[in-house]
């Protein structure tokens, strides 16, 4: 008999969005927070730059909104942008209350002042990025995790991989509600049934679908795939942000070099020392990420380069070490002293701008199912995410979804009589080489055919290959016991298909979607919305 668990709220994902929601609910409800591996495995922990917020008296909500709308290429939903930016000061205030150690300004004598140090990143017209040195994500994550660990009503469950959502529709019952999820307990190897009054998808993005990515291995699009299979719409999946500057080194595993370096004056150079960004955009190194990534991609292809170089050596060494201790230390480990030599960099897949469609409270198309953070499509990012808006979105929507859940408490009962996962017809696999081969093939053709620059022919080739892969994976999934690798491959292949289909539908170049066959931008900006044919597809 496989174990069954019951919680008021099941949070799938342990990053900034999931922990924020859990902490806002734990006084009233019993909450479970799941992590696929160690709790620190998600993208939040690795985020360097900071959180964009209107904190300076010279800055305004209108200015932050306008910057976001411009970066978003006409596809941002202004109501969502205003909601998130308008709540930014309160969101930061809550993080400060939790104890997040944001960097403060230094007085002339070297002591800390009461004012927070704000930096500037690409696309922003003001200094509005509050940060904790260059490891903001780790500071936020560690603080929220510590708070969650201290709370009796929050159960943190690591080494748990969500398999699929349980819905009334899948069970042949009336209505369209989410009742919980099936969860693989990696410690026991068995799938547990978890019943929940509310289920929240906070699983992050899907950048692992690409060969080169700044994201951790966990970014396999699980929440997006599960929501789609359950019957939720997804939107704007063709907009995958490529971070322009990841460390180019065979052992660095695409270590992200924060955009804040360029905010503080770092310059992009060719191997001969020549700057090239002024030729592509008047904002040069401070142009939005899509423009910078395409410019680097163009120069690398034009000259046959393996990488370009990010140079901050003209700044004082003490300034570099104090502002960017994490980057300095990591680069030094690979024999690169950024105070004396430029950093070799390449673009890498970084952020999923599309996702599961939600309303202003994080509600999906299925009752009692929410999606928050990078898993969701709120309308904030449009065709290109502006730097440091994503952590803000996590906090704001974690708080908004928690308020919505609390308002419904009296009307939602605990689901009853959920069937256990049936593993009686499957066996242990002796063909795991198929999983690793398909994983590599998928990520390679997505990089080659659905990357920074696209064509219709490349997209058609990618679609043909993903169809064959999904058929193979389905057969494998039907016959063998589930594992983390198999579940992630299944989800990645589905998300790859959604990205390809979305890209094929957009017959223009806008923001992060750039195609040589349709280089112009259409007059009218429209979201790409995909409707699942039926739950379980």
Image (cartoon, rainbow, N blue to C red):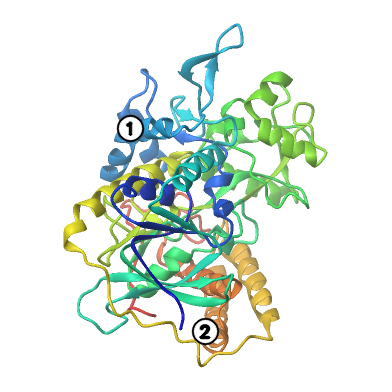
Can you give x and y, in whole percent of width and height, for residue 359 in the image?
Answer: 26, 54
Does label 1 or label 2 sit earlier along the sequence? Answer: 1
Q: Residue at x 51, y 60 (%)?
A: 206
Which of the two marks, 1 or 2, is nearer to us in this view? Answer: 1
Which label is found at residue 90? 1
Q: Which residue of the protein is positioned furthest toward the front in this rendering?
A: 152
Q: Residue at x 62, y 66 (%)?
A: 443
Q: Which residue of the protein is positioned furthest toward the top in this rendering?
A: 109
Quadrant containing the C terminus is bottom left
Can you give x and y, in whole percent of width and height, for residue 376 in the image?
Answer: 38, 56
When the figure is inspected, residue 285 is found, relative to residue 9, above or below; the finding is: above
Q: Which residue of the protein is positioned furthest toward the right in this rendering?
A: 335
Local packing at callout 1 (Cα closer than 10 Å; few below 14, some 14-19, many 20+) is some
- Give the secondary structure at mark 2: helix
List the residue tagged with mark 2: 474
Can you give x and y, in whole percent of width and height, for residue 423 in the image?
Answer: 50, 87
- Position of 113 with respect to 319 (left or right) is left
- Position of 428 with respect to 376 (left or right) is right
Q: Nearer the viewer, residue 362 or 242?
A: 362
């Amino acid at each position: 008999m496989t174990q069954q668990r019951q919680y008021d709220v099941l949070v799938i994902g342990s990053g900034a969005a999931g922990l924020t929601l859990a902490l806002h609910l734990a006084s009233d409800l019993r909450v479970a927070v799941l992590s696929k591996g160690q709790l620190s495995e998600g993208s939040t922990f690795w985020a360097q730059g900071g959180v964009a917020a209107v904190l300076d008296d010279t800055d305004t909500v209108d200015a932050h909104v306008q910057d976001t709308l411009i970066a978003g290429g006409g596809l941002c939903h202004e109501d969502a942008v205003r909601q998130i930016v308008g709540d930014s000061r309160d969101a930061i205030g809550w993080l400060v209350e939790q104890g997040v150690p944001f960097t403060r300004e230094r007085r002339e004598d070297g002591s800390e002042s009461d004012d927070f140090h704000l930096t500037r990143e690409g696309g922003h017209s003001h200094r509005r990025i509050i940060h904790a040195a260059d490891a903001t994500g780790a500071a936020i994550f560690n603080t929220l995790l510590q708070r969650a660990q201290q709370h009796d009503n929050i159960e943190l469950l690591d080494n748990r991989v969500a398999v699929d959502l349980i819905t009334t529709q899948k069970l042949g019952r009336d209505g369209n509600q989410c009742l919980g999820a099936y969860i693989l307990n990696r410690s026991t190897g068995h799938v547990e049934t978890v019943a929940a009054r509310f289920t929240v998808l906070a699983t992050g993005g899907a950048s692992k679908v690409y060969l080169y990515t700044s994201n951790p291995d966990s970014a396999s699009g699980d929440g997006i795939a599960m929501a789609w299979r359950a019957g939720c719409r997804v939107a704007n999946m063709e907009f995958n942000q490529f971070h322009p500057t990841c460390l180019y080194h065979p052992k660095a595993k695409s270590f992200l070099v924060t955009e804040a370096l360029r905010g503080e004056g770092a310059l992009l150079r060719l191997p001969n020392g020549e700057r090239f960004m002024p030729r592509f955009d008047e904002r040069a190194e401070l142009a939005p990420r899509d423009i910078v990534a395409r410019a680097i991609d163009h120069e690398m292809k034009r000259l046959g380069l393996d990488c370009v170089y990010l140079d901050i050596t003209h700044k004082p060494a003490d300034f570099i070490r104090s502002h960017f201790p994490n980057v300095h230390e990591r680069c030094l480990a690979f024999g690169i002293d950024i105070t004396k030599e430029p950093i070799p960099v390449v673009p890498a897949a970084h952020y999923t701008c599309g996702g599961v469609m939600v309303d202003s409270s994080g509600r999906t198309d299925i009752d009692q199912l929410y999606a928050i953070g990078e898993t969701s499509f709120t309308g904030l990012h449009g065709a290109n995410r502006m730097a440091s808006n994503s952590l803000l979105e996590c906090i704001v929507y974690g708080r908004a979804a928690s308020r919505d859940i609390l308002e419904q408490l009296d009307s939602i009962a605990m689901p009853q009589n959920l069937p256990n996962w049936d593993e009686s017809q499957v066996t242990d696999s002796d063909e795991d080489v198929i999983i690793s081969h398909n994983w590599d093939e998928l990520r390679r053709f997505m990089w080659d055919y659905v990357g920074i620059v696209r064509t219709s022919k490349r997209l058609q080739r990618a679609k043909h290959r993903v169809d064959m892969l999904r058929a193979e994976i389905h057969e494998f999934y039907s016959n063998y016991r589930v594992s983390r690798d198999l579940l992630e491959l299944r989800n990645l292949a589905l998300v790859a298909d959604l990205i390809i289909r979305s890209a094929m539908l957009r017959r223009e170049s806008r923001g992060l979607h750039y195609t040589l066959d349709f280089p112009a931008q259409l007059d009218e900006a429209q979201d790409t919305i995909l409707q699942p044919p039926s739950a379980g597809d």
